[in-house]
Amino acid sequence: MITKRQVEIFKAYEGYIDIWALRNKKEEKESMSDDDWRSISKLLIEIANTKQDVRKLLEEKVEDKEAIDELIEMAKTYEKYVFLKPT
């Protein structure tokens, strides 16, 4: 499941996985994998493009309410955080 800390890290690097890979701190690398990063990117796209109840979707994939709220806010401007749509 995606955690609040992972969302904070993703947001701090504005979705740039390359910068995170080069500059991340040990604690950040221990908190989040490349797969977690991609999961957040995909979730932002899903949130931005869905017409369904996104809270229900996120509750299945995200650990806590604060992280869900943050992802919903980030998705409002998801182009800033997501660069390639998943295939």
Image (cartoon, grey):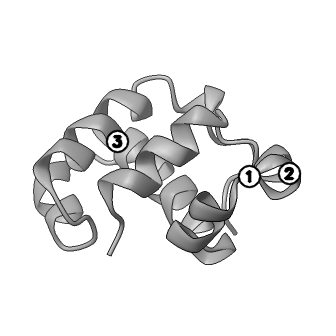
* Disc 1 from disc 2: Cα separation: 10 Å
Q: Is residue 74 visible?
A: yes
Badge 2: residue crowd in 10 Å (few <14, some 14–19, many ≥20): few
Taking the spot 22% from the left edge, 60% from the top edge, the residue there is 58
Taking the spot 55% from the left edge, 68% from the top edge, the residue there is 32
Q: Amino acid at mark 3?
A: Leu
Nearer the camera: disc 2 or disc 3: 2
Q: Amino acid at mark 1?
A: Asn
Q: Amino acid at mark 2?
A: Asp
Question: For the residue labelled by badge 2, is the local secondary structure a helix, a strand or a loop?
Answer: helix
Nearer the camera: disc 1 or disc 2: 1
> Which is nearer the eye, 26 or 21?
26
Placement of the N terminus among the 4 image quadrants = bottom left
Q: Which residue is mark 1?
A: 24
- In the displayed structure, 29 sits above or below 84; it is below
Q: How many marks?
A: 3
